[in-house]
Each structure stands twice: as C-alpha cells, then as structure tokens.
Image (cartoon, grey):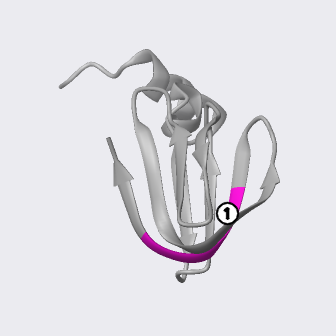
Amino acid sequence: MKPRGLLQRAAETFDLPADALAGLPKLELVGDGELRVENHKGILAYGREEIHISGGGWVIKIAGEGLELRAMTGIELLITGKVSQITLV
C-alpha cells in the first residue's frame, strides 16, 4: 500500500479538495462567456483580447474578445467576454 501525503490526509480529514490546500489554481469555465479562477496570485497583464494571471508555478493566459475583469478578490477572479483559449505556461 502506498503512503498518503500530508495534504491528501488533511483534505480527507477536513473534507476539503486537495487543490485548495495545496494553493493550486482552479479554473471553472461556463460556456465561452464566463471564467472563474480561484487561488490566483495576481494579474500580470490585462487587455480586452488577452489576460495573464499568475497561478504560482504557472502563468494562465486567457485569450478572447471583449474580455473584462468583472470581480476580483484575493482568492477569486471573474472574467467575462468570449473566451477562445486558455493556456498554461
């Protein structure tokens, strides 16, 4: 039997998703018009056709048309517009 990691055991104990404990970004795309990004580390670049977000170890590049940052907290971003591409770099 394989030993379980500390984050996995904590997630199971407290009934939490392991990605939240690890601080990994979580992306939720609703159709092509709404993108939620949780556990972000800030916005690196912002424009109507491209938005770059720090995801810790990655840069999340969102491309599309009419992109707009509708809401931002320390934990979550809400981006609207026509999302055509999401790239992790």
Q: Residue at x 61, y 30 (%)?
A: 41
**The N terminus: image quadrant:** top left
Coordinates of residue 48 in the picture (x, y in percent): 62, 65
Relative to 38, is 71 on the left or the right? right
Q: Residue at x 20, y 24 (%)?
A: 2
The quarter holding residue 66 reads: bottom right
Q: Residue at x 71, y 59 (%)?
A: 78
The quarter holding residue 79 reads: bottom right
Asked if 83 appears above or below 8 in the picture, the reply is below
Q: Residues within 10 Å of mark 1 (few under 14, many from 20)?
A: many
Secondary element at tag 1: strand
Q: Residue at x 54, y 83 (%)?
A: 31
Coordinates of residue 87 in the picture (x, y in percent): 35, 54
Residue 81 among those drawn in magenta: yes
Asked if 15 appears above or below 3 in the picture, the reply is below
Question: Count the marks: how many?
Answer: 1
Highlighted magenta segment, given as a residue range: 78-84
Q: Tell which of 42 and 21 is nearer to you.
A: 42
Coordinates of residue 32 in the picture (x, y in percent): 53, 81
- Chief secondary structure of the magenta span? strand
Coordinates of residue 38 in the picture (x, y in percent): 63, 46
Relative to 54, is 88 on the left or the right? left
Q: Tell which of 83 and 56 is nearer to you.
A: 83
Residue at which label 1 appears = 79
Amino acid residing under circle 1? Ile
The quarter holding residue 44 reads: top right
**The C terminus: image quadrant:** top left
Q: Tell which of 62 and 26 is nearer to you.
A: 62
Q: Tell which of 11 and 83 is nearer to you.
A: 83
